[in-house]
Image (cartoon, rainbow, N blue to C red):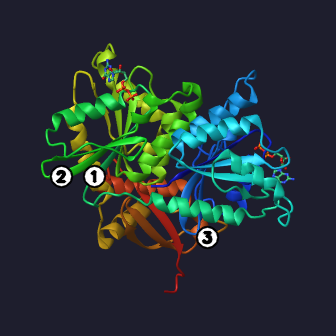
Amino acid sequence: MKPVVAIVGRPNVGKSTLFNRLTRSHLAIVEDYPGVTRDRLYQDAEWNDRKFTLIDTGGIEVNSDDTILARVRKQAQVAMEEADVIIFMCDVRVGVTVEDMEIANMLRRTKKEVILAVNKVENFNKLDDIYEYYQLGLGEPYPISASHGMNTGDLLDRLMELLDDFEDDDYEPDVIKIAVVGRPNVGKSSLTNAILGQERSIVSNIPGTTRDAIDTPFERNGQRYVIVDTAGMRRKSKVAETTTERYSVIRSLRAVDRCDAVLMVINAEEGLIEQDKKIVGYAHEQGKAVILVVNKWDLIEKDDKTSAVMEKKIRSELLFLQYAPMIFVSAQTKQRVSRILDMVNVAVEQNNTRISTSVLNEIIRDAVQLNPPPSDKGKRLKIMYATQSGVKPPTFVLFVNEPEIMHFSYERFLENKIRENFGFEGTPIRFVVRKRSTEE
Ligand code: GDP
Ligand code: GDP
């Protein structure tokens, strides 16, 4: 699981400058999930093979009449809720301000690790100005210059030390890990309870291998599971809903990272919202099994066509996710809840399926005969050979003469052919296109 790091501090101390520097120069940006990172709230980053998510709380929505203190307070609250390590940034040119003191008071009370960064230090031979920062009671201040990149390496080293304590607390591989995700109030907790209520053999309730998700291990028919309810922590939140809602996505993304199957819970009365799309989009990119669970079905006035109409509507908004099965349930009346785990089993199995090279090549050959590959500038794509290189998700390597000629739509066609033969219901599949010379 990727730890989360947040940068907080008054306006103009240099938070964005540091954020940009960390994500741009020092760190390889691992992924750019559409929509999620576009607003620059999150950036996945990597330093010395350590992956983490950086959040820039400077982007938090504020009311125009908010005082600076109120703004920074909001940031600190979000950071204290969502992050594992907080970088608190001050500006040496301004000195310790009343707001800095206030925020330090807040941060001292959190159990989270805090790194105190004193920015805009330009002369590292003359550090007298940073001594006053010891009074904040947050340990040793780190003098840095974000814009010149001075001492930021030391800051990163310290950060890595702290992140080492967040090693993956993973379960054994044969345990199926299920993340229940969705916006607040769709019924994640109710559904989790309904699923667990039918399974008498809950092993134990471990509140928080992470502090923000509740893990419940249980067993059914000899299969072990862990269900991760991402709703838990929010209830304790004192931050205005509007502020946290954007940031609460992080919690869902982290749960997705850790799990094998994602139960995307959708409110039958409201349908899909933008945030749902981001989360399942991420699950898709991460190669997870996905099941679309439309909850509160009891509240819908329906006839024999209602579910088909709703399914069609939801699917039209999730074109990349046609493989995900959909089920209409009520956590309240328990209608169809008992079928969810069966669907999880199937999807996880499909996510782990291998098909033999000979059968795969047969399918590809037939597909190519039916619909010849694209051509470009007089050259036609030739698929020499295909093989499955991995699972979770099933990944197929296509060896071709000219990888550039491969087209998204042709990949989609091959995907459909493979699915016609093998299903792969509930799991994304992936293609990797590699060049291989025709002479071989
Ligand atoms: P934020 O509001 O905390 O995100 O602050 P910004 O990153 O936007 O920076 C505010 C101003 O401080 C910008 O003009 C930056 O160029 C400047 N700045 C950032 N880091 C440094 C630094 O290390 N030294 C100096 N002199 N200026 C800096
Ligand atoms: P969460 O924030 O996603 O965990 O949502 P909760 O499980 O706390 O549910 C939010 C509200 O919706 C609660 O008042 C639940 O009683 C209600 N709720 C959850 N599932 C259903 C359902 O299937 N039908 C109806 N009618 N209400 C539900």
CB under 8 Å between discs 1 and 2: yes
Check disc 2 and report its element: helix, strand or loop.
strand
Q: Residue at x 81, y 45 (%)?
A: 95
Observer able to see residue 166 = yes
Furthest-top residue in this view: 301
Q: Residue at x 58, y 37 (%)?
A: 78
**Quarter of the image with the N terminus in it:** bottom left
Q: Residues within 10 Å of mark 2 (few under 14, many from 20)?
A: few
Place of residue 23 in the rendered image (x, y in percent of width and height, measured from the top left):
68, 57
Residue 223, which numbered label? Answer: 2
Which residue carries the number 1 mark?
176
Check disc 1 and report its element: helix, strand or loop.
strand
Check disc 3 and report its element: helix, strand or loop.
strand
Place of residue 74 in the rendered image (x, y in percent of width and height, measured from the top left):
63, 32
From the Cβ of disc 2, is ligand 2 less than 8 Å away? no
Q: Residue at x 35, y 64 (%)?
A: 363
Q: Tell me how far mark 3 sits from mark 1, CA to CA.
A: 46 Å
Furthest-bottom residue in this view: 440
Q: Residue at x 29, y 18 (%)?
A: 298
Q: Amino acid at mark 2?
A: Gln
Q: Is residue 360 above or below residue 220?
A: below
Toward the viewer: 58 or 158? 158
Quarter of the displayed picture in which ligand 2 can be seen: top left
Q: Indicate left or right for 65 with 385 as reference.
A: right
From the Cβ of disc 1, is ligand 2 less than 8 Å away? no
Place of residue 358 in the rendered image (x, y in percent of width and height, measured from the top left):
31, 73
Q: Amino acid at mark 3?
A: Lys
Q: Amino acid at mark 1?
A: Ile
Q: Quadrant of residue 49?
A: bottom right
Residue 379, which numbered label? Answer: 3
Going from the N terminus, do you reach mark 3 or mark 1 first? Answer: 1
